Image (cartoon, grey):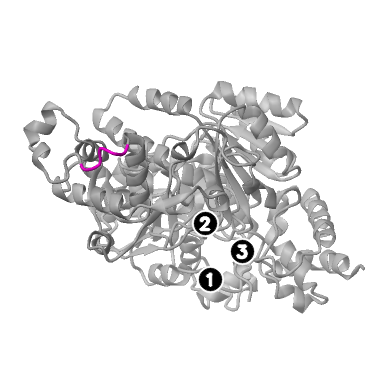
Amino acid sequence: MFSQCTDAGDRVLGVSPFDELPAAREGVGTPLSGSEAALHRVFGFREFRPGQRAIVEHLVSGGDAFVLMPTGGGKSLCYQLPALIRPGTAVVVSPLISLMKDQVDALQAQGVAAAAFNSSLGPGEARETLARLRAGELDLLYVAPERVMADSFLGLLDELDIGLFAIDEAHCVSQWGHDFRPEYVQLGELRARFPGVPLVALTATADEQTREDVRLRLGLLDAPVFMAGFDRPNIRYLVVEKRRPFEQLRAFVSERAGLSGIVYCLSRKRVEEVAAKLRAAGVEAGAYHAGLAAEERVRVQEAFQHDRLQVVVATVAFGLGIDKPDVRFVVHYDMPKSIESYYQETGRAGRDGLPADALLLYSLADLVMARVLVEGGGNPEQIRIELHKLNAMVGFAETLGCRRRALLAYLGETLEKDCGNCDVCLDPPDTYDATEDAQKALSCVYRVGQRFGMAHVIDVLRGADTERMRSLGHDRLSTYGIGAHLGKDVWTSLFRQLIHRGYLRQDIAKYSVLTLTDRARPLLAGQEQLSLALPRFAVTAGEGGPEGDGRTYGSRSRRSRRGSPAVLFDGSIELDRDLFERLRMVRRRLADEQGVPAYVVFSDATLQEMAVLRPASLDALLAVNGVGEVKLERYGAPFLEELSRQ
């Protein structure tokens, strides 16, 4: 059984008019015969992804919900499908015009009555959209947060039959979120004003503090929380020390010739410089940032969507509204300011479920630049929050343990074993028996009352002779000075590994204090042995090993994916690459004829499944995941013709 691996949730592919459904609608709002029938015939999938069914059925029944689902996990489907089944119009609050456009275009291609109401519409288009809304002709309406909360618009909604409210990118509601937007805060009024209408908040990036803040502000404290987990196992995380960054980038991109990728830079100037250098190196690359004319941004975005550009070099302004499922790599040329930003941006790779790479080029100079940007803000509390997030990002970049463990631990999820799909797992550092040192660290956290941050606990362990230490009485603790044999950097590495492995929790809401978790008990009691990574600087001051220290692009960890596109499944089934490329050419021709991006016809994942299964009839082709009945009718013949060739 193949899993649902095309990008169903974040961009709905294909076309399925409603007269093809088992129970044709007499008018807008007539219930469909069932969520599975709609899933298959409208969206082209045989089964729900994990977690989707429960959310859909809960919303269809009229319940509120908070949904946390990773990018590419199908979160948009969780409200789009109930919007089609429930009577009335679903109102979707979305932060970016580009995001609305992609969602609406895709839904309209399915035959869904969807529209956006935003500042990009001309006067005539705006009047037409509102007229359709008043007439009850829309299944979904996408609006910006400031527009939906306008008194005139709320008054209009009071008169209408609203099927549900969906708050997308809901982390924007919280001051703890990495992308806090003040205009989102007022959205909590929707719950009070429309008490009988189900409200769902959805996000792919929210730590525990952010989740609770969002639920509080949106009036969802009594609503169930649906968490599909943060792990994106198809993404390989690579962190590399910056040495000659453009040469590192050029080598990385050259090994992925013909594959789509995004390169993120911190400043507009650097975006343009890197894009120009890539073009000079023969790479089809475009620049994208908020300082460019709107027409140029649209040109670059559409060229990338239609595979006329291989790489887009961008600031974080690019990508939130991009639903391109076949992005095979994301590179951070500069370090992001938070793990949430990093997670969201790397999540734009591999949304089709196929293998993808996320490369971070890291240097202390990046840290200095990011810190200056953060400290330039005017709100002291917001600066404190963002500095905590920046320090956590540094901890991720410098971790000596599994990257995925570190990433998920920050987001509140524990991975029980190393992932085997990051640079550290593929080129692991030396390890040592850290049981005794870890016990000292955990004991010290306990002795200071679990009320202090990492820096102070390390000072206690190392026996710092300061006035603050004496005034707190911490120089009289049993753990004072018991860690003087290790340097501050070694202790910092150890504490970070204890956090990433779930022995300690760092509470952002309480000034980053360290607290023990239940997992720490057996280690403190001597019932468990712990092996941790030895800091590389503690091993050698040189390059370390015949292939380098694993932190420069060029180590063995990169070599298993050289060349051609990523392969579907687990490698146990051999893919006929020649056939796959021929199917891609058929897709390209059909897409060009219709003027749509290639993945709107079929995703790479669907084409790879065709190349493996080699269906020989229309019925067999319909069994391929991502092929719905309308797509079968529209595209089946040319693909079957290509599949029949020897």
Q: Residues within 10 Å of mark 2 (few under 14, many from 20)?
A: many
Report helix, strand or loop for mark 1. Answer: loop
Q: Position of residue 26 (x, y in %)?
A: 55, 72
x, y (%) of residue 246?
64, 28
Mark 2 touches mark 3? (CB < 8 Å): no
* Alpha-carbon span between mark 3 and mark 1: 11 Å
* Mark closer to the observer (2, 3): 2
Q: Nearer the viewer, residue 455 or 203?
A: 455
Mark 2 vs mark 3, CA separation in Å: 12 Å
**Residue 497 appears anywhere in the view:** yes
Does the magenta run of residues contain 485?
A: yes
**Range of residues picked out in magenta:** 482-486
Q: Secondary structure at mark 3?
A: loop
User: Which residue position is annotated with label 2?
Assistant: 232
Question: Farthest front residue?
Answer: 485
Mark 1 — residue?
48
Q: Is residue 609 above or below residue 391?
A: below
The C terminus sits in image quarter: bottom right
The mark closer to the camera, 3 or 1, is 3
Q: Amino acid at mark 2?
A: Arg
Neighbour tally class for label 3: few under 14, some 14-19, many 20 plus, Cα within 10 Å: many
Counting from the top left corner in percent of width and height, residue 509 is at 24, 44
Residue 621, picture quadrant: bottom right
What is the x, y in percent for residue 564?
76, 51
Residue at x 27%, y 60% (from the top left corner): 523
Read off the residue under disc 3. 5
User: In what element is the residue under mark 2?
Assistant: loop
- The quadrant holding residue 463 is top left
**Three-letter amino acid code of the residue under disc 3:** Cys
